[in-house]
Amino acid sequence: MNICVVKMRPSVSRSIVSAAASIKRAPGDTQNKCQEVKPFLQIPGPVALPLIGSVWKYILPGPNRYDPERLHEVACQKYDEFGPLVRETLPDGSGLLSVFDPDDVQSFLLQTRIRPDRRSHLALQKYRLDRPHMYSSGGLLPSNGEDWLRLRRPSQAVFGRPDVVASRLPQVDQIVRDFISLLRALRTADLQVPDLLHRIKMMNMEVMLMVLFGERFGCVTERPSAQCSALMEAGGRSTRAIFKTDNGPLRLYRYVSTPLYRQLVDSQDYIYSVAKQKYEEAKSRKGSEEAPSGGGTTVLEGLMRAQQLGEREVMGLLCDALMAGVDTTSYALAFALYHLACNSGPQQRLADETHALMATSHGRVTEDVLRAAKYTRAALKESMRLIPISIGIGRINYSPILLRGYHIPAGTTIVSMNQHIGSNPLYFRDPEAFRPERFLEDSAELHHSHALLPFGQGSRMCIARSIARQAVHTTLLHMVNNFTLKWHGPKLGCKVRLINEPDAPLSLSFTDREVKASVSPQPAG
Ligand code: HEM
């Protein structure tokens, strides 16, 4: 094969060094403070071919192919071959950097904090920008710069507000208890539940719809409503289409309506239609006494009240939440259940915490229970250390930065390799072990502040992390209060479809626990 190694011409090299001299020494660049700035093209990495850059590594067959569905294994390949900073070239000629050292992660996130651009969901962005009567921008996920900030500022105030998140906890708790009953009803003779992951997703869809609109949709029943199934189907089809269009080398959908792009259009049109119906209902309710079930404010009501957001902005945010809110939370929960099922010690410690806390709350998960559930929080964190939902955090630097002594030109896609860092013995003792204790306050283990970033970092971190944590913690508490979990399959891994998802069915059994805190009517007052 005729492989062309991209070599740097001396004139280019000189201009980079002089350009680098004009870059401000960023406070985050801790490496090589006194050394000469090294040119970008000196960063090790696979060779680049004309037109397709390093993408050939992902598409051409061969023993060392980079499997795009196994990005965690690819990360190990890159680290072993090239070290802690690896450069690739994208088909448009721009650079892609993989960063394996938490000091460097901290450094590039610090240097890009003023403008935390990201490159993802590009076909979704096109779909929305082509429909200005429906959306005002590409939405939170793909937008950058001013467009992103205009949406993020007012919506952040809603997604993180205590009266929006915590006020829905009684309904979320009820949904999870209904889910526990459903699992009992669906268990087969071997105490397993067929198609468990799908059921988990349905439950999280119900939670998301409750937090957004304040209503039950009938997702947590033996036969979920047609609307739940259609929403779930649309979310899955959108995710698959976005993953493939984002990673295709040619991105033909920009010029012709490819089958994948049409799949995205159809599924997004459906998600939009549901959100629009709920928007219209809420608009007609405005000012009337009629409120959705339960107290507190829904996300939709909060967004409609935000002065800076009009209908098209609110619609984009609702569709973003319906897309990003279900699979993420479901896979995080699935991996946590798997880790607990395989580790009886931590599972028992979690059960002890659960029984103690829920005995005083009459079998319900309340705000007080969540606040005190330290081991539950540590268990989720530990599970996301081993298998996070995202392999790392991506940013595109708007202006040149310095990293590890190298000049990084503007427009480089920089990705932290947190999944790799999480299993690297340099940063975590005994990294293979599932040991939530390492994150308890009295633990002697110290961890780098940027080694573990399951919800991202800085002003662009996950907008709904409080909603997600509330849902997963509540489910873990109820699960372990009711069942002893046991794993029956081979070791579970992850494959990438936009985010990390389980690479095999969930072979979990649910044995009723003899000792548990039972739900009883709460005392009045
Ligand atoms: C356990 C569950 C979840 C995990 C692990 C997770 C993780 C993440 C991560 C890593 C990011 C990128 C952050 C960054 O670039 O710094 C992100 C962004 C985002 N997440 Fe989540 N997420 C979860 C649940 C949710 C839920 C329930 C929603 C629903 C509303 C949601 C909506 C979003 C949105 C809209 C963004 C883009 C934010 C922006 O660009 O400003 N996520 N999430």
Image (cartoon, rainbow, N blue to C red):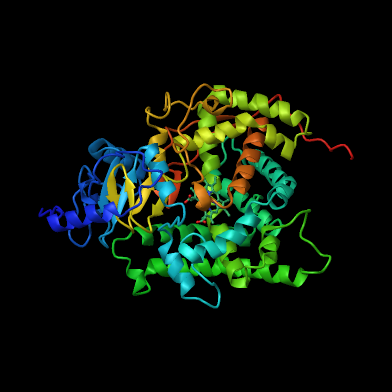
Asked where in the image residue 391 lies, by quadrant, the reply is top left
Nearest the eye: 298 or 451: 451
In the image, 280 versus 260, the foreground residue is: 280
* Residue 464 point in image, percent of width and height: 59, 51
Task: Return the residue found at the far left.
Answer: 2
Between 478 and 132, the one lying in front of the other is: 132
Residue located 66% across and 70% down the image: 277
* Residue 416 image position (x, y, % from top left): 39, 44
| Left or right placement of residue 372 versus residue 414 in this view | right
- Which residue occupies the extreme bottom position in the image? 133
In this picture, is 384 found above or below 287? above
Residue 149 lies, in percent from the top left, at 53, 62
Above or below — where is 213 with respect to 162? below
Q: Is residue 381 left or right of residue 99?
A: right
Q: Quadrant of residue 210?
A: bottom right
Q: Nearer the viewer, residue 124 or 189?
A: 124
Quarter that holds the C terminus: top right
Q: Is residue 475 left or right of residue 337?
A: right
Q: Is residue 365 visible from the viewing direction of this image?
A: no
Answer yes or no: is residue 207 visible: yes
Q: Residue 169: x and y, percent?
A: 71, 46
Question: Residue at horizontal 87%, vertical 37%?
Answer: 523
Q: How many marks?
A: 0
- 34 sits left or right of 468 in the view: left
